[in-house]
Image (tube, coloured by chain):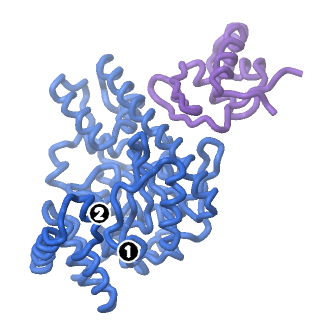
Chain colours: A purple, B blue
Amino acid sequence: MAVRWVRAAAALSRRTLEGTLVRIGPETVLLSASASALLDVLERPHSAEEAADRLARATGTPAETVRADIDALLTDLAARGVVTSWP
Amino acid sequence: VAVTWRDQPLVVAIAAHGLDGAAASWPTSPLGREAWDRLVGVVARQRLQGLLAFAVADGALPVTDPQRAEVAARHRDAMTDVLHLEARLLDVAEALDGAGLDWRAVKGSATAHLDYADPSQRVFGDVDVLVPAAHLRDAVDALAGIGARRTRPPLGHGFEQRFAKSVELVDGDGCQIDLHRTLALEPFGLRITEDDLFGAPVRFEAGGRKLPALPVETRFLLACYHASLGNYPVRLVPLRDVAQIASCPTLDVDRVVTLARRWWARAVAADAVRTAWALFGLPADAPVARWAGGYAPTRRESAALSAFQRPDRRQAHRTAATLATLPGLRARAAYLRAVLRPDRAYLASRGLGAGQWLRRSRALVGRGWSR
């Protein structure tokens, strides 16, 4: 079964003109627009494929294009502790 | 207020951005360099970076590309600070919960999350929590465990639990944590009944915790206190908070008036609402505006209010107003004794001797009393 991802409960965040600002532990990071959109989707648990499909529908981007990027984005967000696997 | 902000309609428009029915006038083209620099300076001092960012994002305020980049950078910096404070609030929550204390998050984070369409609109500069008077000292002890220290010793034994609005703490990073005992300075704060503050809390989520806060009617009155009594000249964010919370569809105006009557706060609430409505050009048919427009303060209320709304000797006039309104001779004597004869540690923290303090206090109280 595919891993599902969700936004880390401990992450504090604010929206800015440049993207979402996230504080996790002592670190604050500014997410890109695409990472911010992914984080919005991951307010609820999704697999990478489900998240890619939702983002593709929301942005009108071809699903293949989103899927090609999403694994790298998720890896980066998980490494920063911004998203975690679910459950 | 009119005199202070009349010549800055754009700043007022930013402070009112997003309020239903606000009469804002926006420029039709980007500001020139000098006007822009002046604007962003005032916006920063008034902590309006969030509302400015939204006004730019919504297209209400036309800007050049460099101006947009500056707005984005200033908002990002302000939000970075806000997130630091919110993380500190979580530490405070853990410390107070760990000590088994009842508490409520007030102002900053609570207002941003509970009252604004997007918390990114609301900038704040410290951490504010409310604790019952009997547990004020326990709360100070609990927060020492996370590195927060008092900025000053108490004025006198038991003064803070009985008369003060709050105890100010600061941590190693310079983050200010205000431990409130009540919602306003004396004399108004002395009339607020604690049972009304520590009923069932509402909660907001931050960092995976459900933090306790005040119900919307109490948050509204807190915003009114802050707007009317907090600063002179009045600051824009507290006035925006008043209008923002008033727009909440669940706000029960009858409950607000009931609480305000019980707390001797009707004049404060009416003043804050009238000021916010006049400044932002809000529709006069809002229920809370209709009530405020019809409320006539008593002479004593007006006198107490005027102690705060003046540029000079606010402390002296506040002391005089408190003495005039404190019920009972014993309470007045205790208050006056504490004000005139503070503890040595307090005086040392101010770099004053007992004689200097007494001379200064007598002169100040005398001036305030004879206003």
Q: Quadrant of residue B43?
A: top left
Are the numbered discs 2 and 1 placed on the same chain, yes or no? yes
Look at the image and tell me in which quarter the C terminus of chain B lies. bottom left
Query: x, y percentage for residue A5?
Result: 75, 27
Query: x, y percentage for residue A65?
Result: 68, 8
Q: Nearer the viewer, residue B110 or B171?
A: B171
Query: x, y percentage for residue B350?
Result: 23, 59
Label 2, residues with CA under 10 Å away: few <14, some 14-19, many ≥20? many
Q: Is residue B18 visible?
A: no
Query: x, y percentage for residue B339?
Result: 25, 75
Say if mark 2 contacts mark 1, CB within 8 Å.
Answer: no
Q: Residue furthest bottom?
A: B329
Label 1, residues with CA under 10 Å away: few <14, some 14-19, many ≥20? few
Instruction: Tell which circle, 2 or 1, labels the residue nearer the N-terminal end.
Output: 1
Q: Quadrant of residue B34?
A: top left
Q: Nearer the viewer, residue B7 or B319?
A: B319
Q: What is the chain identity of the residue bearing mark 1? A: B
Identify the residue shown where x is 54% and y is 57%. B142
B125 left or right of B136 in image: left
Q: Amino acid at mark 1?
A: His
Q: Is A79 rendered above or below residue B326?
A: above
Judging by the rendered image, the residue that carries numbered circle 2 is: B228
Identify the residue shown where x is 68% and y is 22%. A78
Identify the residue shown where x is 21% and y is 26%. B31
Q: Amino acid at mark 2?
A: Ser
Identify the residue shown where x is 17% and y is 49%. B6
B111 left or right of B291 in image: right
Q: Secondary structure at mark 2?
A: helix
Judging by the rendered image, the residue that carries numbered circle 1 is: B157
Q: Is B184 rendered above or below residue B80?
A: below
